[in-house]
Image (tube, rainbow, N blue to C red):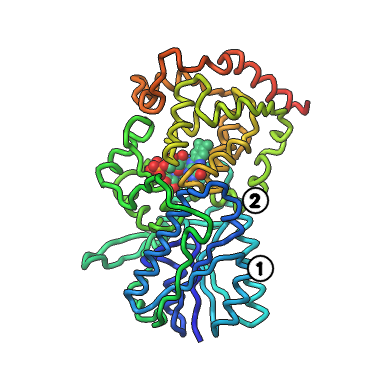
Amino acid sequence: AITLFWFRRDLRLQDNAGLYHALKSNFPVLPLFIFDTEILDELDDPEDARVAFLHQRITELQAELEHLGSSMLVRYGKPAEVWPEILQDYLVAEVYTNHDYEPRAIQRDEAVQNLLAQQNIPYFSFKDQVIFEKLEVTKLDGKPYTVFTPYSRMWKNCLASQMETIQENGIEQVISFFLKPYPTEKYYPNFWQTAPPPLPALSAMGFQPSSIAIPPTTVSRGLIKQYDKTRDFPYLNGTSRLGIHFRFGTISIREKARRALELNETFLNELIWRDFYAQILFNFPHVAQRSFRPEYDQIEWRNDEDEFEKWCAGKTGYPIVDAGLRELNATGYMHNRVRMITASFLTKHLLIDWRWGEAYFAKKLLDYDLASNNGGWQWAAGCGTDAAPYFRVFSPAAQQEKFDPEYKYVRKWVPEYGTDAYPKPIVDHKFARERCLEVYKAALKGG
Ligand code: FAD
């Protein structure tokens, strides 16, 4: 009999909580990955860079495992259909995995757990993706936080509440229990020694390689040290670009949080935002469809399709907005400051439903993550947990002046800016601002 370890968004062997526990089980471990058609079938771009990245990463993991004399079972299909087949093909004693907090993933995991229970196969799942999950960081009454600043204060208290001494590279260190690495490498001999079954080709799944480059998993110490000074300026290379690696678990959050703690508190805060939105999605799953604050679902969005298309294409006539969308379309990345500006512009200037923008970002962002994307959009639209008050409408011109005063970012992405070829503003700022305030006010008064 064997133990199966099911990889999902934790695609690394090192410092992987669930894998560590699997390797300590009483059976040899066979890792498993399922290319999930429930997700892949919803993607409409055959050159989706995230799928190509995923395929490449699974190929690499399989090679790493082969090097250890083991392998990875890779299947393509719906988990609900693939699992019964696996249980027929292998004598499975136990199943290990890591928690996933998205509503659909929770349903998927419950279904698999039920199937396993029918055959008396134990299923063990662990926290790996975040430092604190679910209801680990709560208010004193045990309820989840919905405002970031007090959450982050309590997050730091929790981190400091269990300190331990460990040896790393022969050096004694005091670190939080919650940031301790899981030394999977000590147990590599416990992988099942078996030959690798073939991996489905990318083309067999209907996808092709992408020309979009994936940022590396490493970031210089210098960049993190300077992060608080550089991160707000889109024309600088001042942020880590690690988003996609956090998304797929190709890096360990514990390792990066240790680094952040040592080098830059502002960077640590961004990692805390990530935990914050993950616990919001888990504790308030309705946000995946609706506003966190129900009264905001009364807003009468204009939802003009032509204007939406212009926004998507980066042709609104507002240079910083257009630069952002064009950066996104070309690279699968958009700088955080510009995500805030473009999201605010779509929802408040154009009065287009935040869910339209959320879906567009979901299609395009390499680092797309339901919890953080949803949190970012609801923040910008004013309907979210920690939202900017609705009456604060970003002025694109003022944002431009502050964060790209020399138009370096704009010139990079909108070369025709300043010529006749560049479109006139899609809407007048003052007019749009007043219209937004009226529509929001009407919704919040109940019509
Ligand atoms: P860095 O600035 O180097 O930060 C390091 C890491 O911290 C990020 O990779 C990310 O994991 C985390 N982080 C940073 N800022 C935030 C934040 N505000 N909320 C949550 N986590 C954060 N982030 C995503 O990971 N996926 C998304 O789909 C996503 N959509 C967004 C949509 C909108 C409208 C907005 C305003 C923000 C969104 N963000 C999203 C948050 C943020 O913009 C990105 O995490 C960041 O720009 C990624 O670039 P980076 O890796 O260089 O981040």
Judging depth in this view, the residue of 24 and 244 nearest the camera is 244
Quadrant containing the C terminus in the rendered view: top right
Position in image of residue 444 (x %, y %): 72, 28
Where is residue 398, by image quadrant?
Answer: top left
Position of 16 compared to 281: left or right? left
Label 1–label 2 contact, CB within 8 A? no
Is 330 rendered above or below residue 432? below
Is residue 359 in view?
yes
Position in image of residue 167 (x %, y %): 27, 67
Position of 392 compared to 182: left or right? right
| Amino acid of disc 1 | Ala
- Mark 1 → mark 2, Cα distance in angstroms: 18 Å
Judging depth in this view, the residue of 127 and 361 nearest the camera is 361
| Residue shown at 66% from the left, 68% from the top | 111
Judging depth in this view, the residue of 424 and 285 nearest the camera is 424
Q: How crowded is mark 2: few (under 14 residues within 10 Å), some or many (20 or more)?
A: some
Position in image of residue 394 (x %, y %): 52, 23
Is residue 141 in view?
no
| Residue shown at 45% from the left, 41% from the top | 332
Position in image of residue 95 (x %, y %): 54, 76
- The residue beneath circle 2 is 285
Q: Closer to the N terminus: mark 1 or mark 2?
A: 1
- The residue beneath circle 1 is 111
Callout 2 secondary element:
helix
Which of discs 1 and 2 lies nearer the camera? The answer is: 1
Is 87 rendered above or below residue 235? below
| Amino acid of disc 2 | Pro
| Residue shown at 32% from the left, 36% from the top | 237
Is 347 rendered above or below residue 429? below
Q: Residues within 10 Å of mark 1 (few under 14, many from 20)?
A: some
Q: Is mark 1 within 8 Å of ligand 1?
A: no
Farthest residue in the bottom direction? 1
